[in-house]
Amino acid sequence: MSSSTRVECQQGDIVQQHDMDAVVNAANAELRPGGGVAGALHRAAGSELDKACRSLAPIAPGQAVITDAFELPNQYVIHCLGPVYGVDSPADELLAACYYNALRLAEWENIHSIAFPSISTGAFGYPVAEAARIALSTVIQQLPSFPNIERVRFVLFDADTAELYQRTLASFNES
Protein backbone atom coordinates (compact mmCIF):
# COMPACT_ATOMS: atom_id res chain seq x y z
CA MET A 1 0.00 0.00 0.00
CA SER A 2 1.44 3.39 -0.94
CA SER A 3 1.64 6.11 1.66
CA SER A 4 -0.85 8.31 -0.21
CA THR A 5 -3.55 5.62 0.04
CA ARG A 6 -3.24 5.86 3.84
CA VAL A 7 -4.13 9.57 3.78
CA GLU A 8 -7.67 10.95 3.68
CA CYS A 9 -9.21 14.41 3.80
CA GLN A 10 -12.73 15.15 4.98
CA GLN A 11 -14.90 17.90 6.36
CA GLY A 12 -15.71 17.40 10.03
CA ASP A 13 -15.18 18.19 13.67
CA ILE A 14 -11.77 17.29 15.13
CA VAL A 15 -13.35 16.44 18.49
CA GLN A 16 -15.63 13.81 16.88
CA GLN A 17 -12.97 11.46 15.49
CA HIS A 18 -14.05 8.37 17.44
CA ASP A 19 -12.17 5.94 15.17
CA MET A 20 -8.76 7.65 15.49
CA ASP A 21 -6.14 6.83 18.14
CA ALA A 22 -4.89 10.41 18.32
CA VAL A 23 -6.03 13.89 17.34
CA VAL A 24 -3.73 16.83 16.77
CA ASN A 25 -4.24 20.15 18.48
CA ALA A 26 -3.29 23.33 16.61
CA ALA A 27 -1.88 24.64 19.87
CA ASN A 28 -0.66 27.96 21.18
CA ALA A 29 2.81 28.19 22.72
CA GLU A 30 1.49 27.86 26.27
CA LEU A 31 -0.74 24.86 25.34
CA ARG A 32 -3.70 26.62 26.91
CA PRO A 33 -7.35 26.60 25.86
CA GLY A 34 -8.02 29.25 23.26
CA GLY A 35 -10.12 29.65 20.16
CA GLY A 36 -10.45 27.39 17.16
CA VAL A 37 -9.12 23.84 17.38
CA ALA A 38 -7.38 24.36 20.74
CA GLY A 39 -10.54 25.69 22.35
CA ALA A 40 -12.71 22.91 20.94
CA LEU A 41 -10.33 20.14 22.04
CA HIS A 42 -9.83 21.57 25.52
CA ARG A 43 -13.60 21.98 26.04
CA ALA A 44 -14.29 18.42 24.89
CA ALA A 45 -11.39 16.87 26.82
CA GLY A 46 -12.20 18.58 30.11
CA SER A 47 -10.01 20.45 32.58
CA GLU A 48 -7.55 17.55 32.97
CA LEU A 49 -6.12 18.32 29.53
CA ASP A 50 -5.20 21.85 30.57
CA LYS A 51 -3.55 20.51 33.74
CA ALA A 52 -1.58 17.91 31.74
CA CYS A 53 -0.32 20.57 29.34
CA ARG A 54 1.03 23.00 31.92
CA SER A 55 4.29 21.14 32.61
CA LEU A 56 4.96 20.73 28.86
CA ALA A 57 4.71 24.42 27.96
CA PRO A 58 5.99 26.52 26.43
CA ILE A 59 6.74 24.97 23.07
CA ALA A 60 8.29 26.62 20.01
CA PRO A 61 6.95 26.74 16.44
CA GLY A 62 7.39 23.33 14.79
CA GLN A 63 7.49 21.43 18.10
CA ALA A 64 5.01 18.77 19.18
CA VAL A 65 4.21 17.22 22.57
CA ILE A 66 1.76 14.49 23.54
CA THR A 67 -0.79 14.06 26.34
CA ASP A 68 -3.62 11.71 27.16
CA ALA A 69 -6.94 12.68 25.58
CA PHE A 70 -8.99 12.50 28.81
CA GLU A 71 -12.69 12.90 27.92
CA LEU A 72 -12.13 12.88 24.15
CA PRO A 73 -12.93 9.60 22.35
CA ASN A 74 -9.23 9.18 21.47
CA GLN A 75 -6.24 7.87 23.41
CA TYR A 76 -3.95 10.84 22.83
CA VAL A 77 -3.76 14.49 21.86
CA ILE A 78 -0.62 15.60 20.06
CA HIS A 79 -0.14 19.35 20.46
CA CYS A 80 1.68 21.20 17.65
CA LEU A 81 2.60 24.86 17.53
CA GLY A 82 2.42 26.05 13.95
CA PRO A 83 4.13 29.19 12.72
CA VAL A 84 2.43 32.56 12.68
CA TYR A 85 2.51 33.46 8.99
CA GLY A 86 4.67 36.50 8.29
CA VAL A 87 6.19 36.39 11.80
CA ASP A 88 7.85 32.98 12.34
CA SER A 89 10.35 31.95 9.72
CA PRO A 90 11.11 29.95 7.75
CA ALA A 91 7.35 29.39 7.91
CA ASP A 92 7.28 26.49 5.44
CA GLU A 93 9.95 24.53 7.34
CA LEU A 94 8.30 25.18 10.70
CA LEU A 95 4.90 24.06 9.39
CA ALA A 96 6.41 20.90 7.88
CA ALA A 97 8.16 20.25 11.22
CA CYS A 98 4.76 20.26 12.98
CA TYR A 99 3.52 17.39 10.85
CA TYR A 100 6.82 15.50 10.98
CA ASN A 101 7.14 15.83 14.77
CA ALA A 102 3.51 14.76 15.30
CA LEU A 103 4.07 11.67 13.15
CA ARG A 104 7.32 10.92 15.01
CA LEU A 105 5.51 11.06 18.37
CA ALA A 106 2.71 8.89 16.99
CA GLU A 107 5.21 6.29 15.83
CA TRP A 108 7.00 6.42 19.19
CA GLU A 109 3.71 5.80 21.04
CA ASN A 110 2.64 3.02 18.63
CA ILE A 111 -0.33 5.07 17.43
CA HIS A 112 -1.96 3.59 14.32
CA SER A 113 -4.29 6.43 13.30
CA ILE A 114 -4.00 10.19 13.65
CA ALA A 115 -6.28 13.09 12.72
CA PHE A 116 -4.84 16.52 11.88
CA PRO A 117 -6.57 19.87 11.55
CA SER A 118 -5.26 22.48 9.10
CA ILE A 119 -2.46 23.80 11.33
CA SER A 120 -1.72 27.56 11.29
CA THR A 121 -4.48 28.49 8.82
CA GLY A 122 -6.85 30.07 11.35
CA ALA A 123 -5.69 32.85 13.66
CA PHE A 124 -2.05 32.30 12.60
CA GLY A 125 -2.91 33.42 9.04
CA TYR A 126 -1.17 30.79 6.91
CA PRO A 127 -2.60 30.74 3.36
CA VAL A 128 -4.71 27.59 3.15
CA ALA A 129 -3.56 26.39 -0.29
CA GLU A 130 0.12 26.63 0.67
CA ALA A 131 -0.53 25.03 4.07
CA ALA A 132 -2.40 22.13 2.43
CA ARG A 133 0.49 21.51 0.01
CA ILE A 134 3.06 21.53 2.84
CA ALA A 135 0.93 19.37 5.15
CA LEU A 136 0.08 16.72 2.57
CA SER A 137 3.53 16.57 0.95
CA THR A 138 5.20 16.23 4.37
CA VAL A 139 2.85 13.46 5.51
CA ILE A 140 3.07 11.55 2.21
CA GLN A 141 6.88 11.81 2.11
CA GLN A 142 7.36 10.87 5.77
CA LEU A 143 4.82 8.06 6.21
CA PRO A 144 7.16 5.34 4.85
CA SER A 145 9.48 6.13 7.79
CA PHE A 146 6.68 5.46 10.28
CA PRO A 147 5.40 1.92 9.65
CA ASN A 148 3.11 1.80 12.71
CA ILE A 149 0.94 4.60 11.34
CA GLU A 150 -1.76 3.01 9.21
CA ARG A 151 -4.02 5.99 8.59
CA VAL A 152 -3.78 9.79 8.59
CA ARG A 153 -6.91 11.89 8.34
CA PHE A 154 -7.07 15.60 7.73
CA VAL A 155 -10.24 16.89 9.37
CA LEU A 156 -11.22 20.22 7.87
CA PHE A 157 -13.78 22.48 9.48
CA ASP A 158 -15.46 23.89 6.37
CA ALA A 159 -16.39 22.52 2.95
CA ASP A 160 -14.11 24.85 0.97
CA THR A 161 -11.03 23.83 2.96
CA ALA A 162 -11.94 20.15 2.76
CA GLU A 163 -12.35 20.41 -1.02
CA LEU A 164 -9.00 22.20 -1.35
CA TYR A 165 -7.23 19.49 0.69
CA GLN A 166 -8.94 16.75 -1.35
CA ARG A 167 -7.84 18.38 -4.64
CA THR A 168 -4.30 18.79 -3.31
CA LEU A 169 -4.18 15.14 -2.21
CA ALA A 170 -5.46 14.04 -5.62
CA SER A 171 -2.69 16.04 -7.32
CA PHE A 172 -0.08 14.14 -5.28
CA ASN A 173 -1.71 10.82 -6.21
CA GLU A 174 -1.48 11.74 -9.91
CA SER A 175 2.21 12.60 -9.82
Image: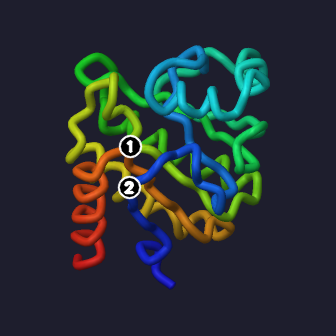
Q: Is residue 52 left or right of residue 97?
A: right
Q: Quadrant of the C terminus?
A: bottom left
Give the residue type that dot 2 points to. Gln
| Residue 129: % across, % down | 20, 47
| Residue 50: % across, % down | 71, 20
Q: Residue at x 56, y 42 (%)?
A: 24
* Above or below, comparing residue 163 to residue 86 in the picture: below
Q: Is residue 53 left or right of residue 165?
A: right
Count of all numbered marks drawn on residues in the image: 2
Q: Earlier in the sequence, mark 1 or mark 2?
A: 2
SS class, disc 2 = strand
What residue did someone put label 2 on?
Answer: 11
Give the residue type that dot 1 points to. Ser
Crowd rating for badge 2 (residues with CA inside 10 Å; few <14, some 14–19, many 20+) = some
Closer to the eye: label 1 or 2: 2
Q: Is residue 20 left or right of residue 142?
A: right
Q: Residue at x 63, y 27 (%)?
A: 42
Instruction: Tell me the quarter of the picture where residue 164 sits.
Output: bottom left
SS class, disc 1 = loop
Color theme of the render: rainbow
Residue 162 — which label?
Answer: none
Instruction: Tell me the quarter of the picture where residue 137 sits.
Output: bottom left
Seen as rendered, the residue at the extreme bottom is 1
Distance from label 1 to label 2 (Cα)?
11 Å
In the foreground, 71 or 139: 71
| Residue 124: % across, % down | 33, 24
| Residue 51: % across, % down | 77, 18
Q: Is residue 32 left or right of residue 169?
A: right
Q: Residue at x 44, y 58 (%)?
A: 139
What residue did someone put label 1 on?
Answer: 118
Q: Residue at x 48, y 47 (%)?
A: 13
In the foreground, 163 or 99: 163
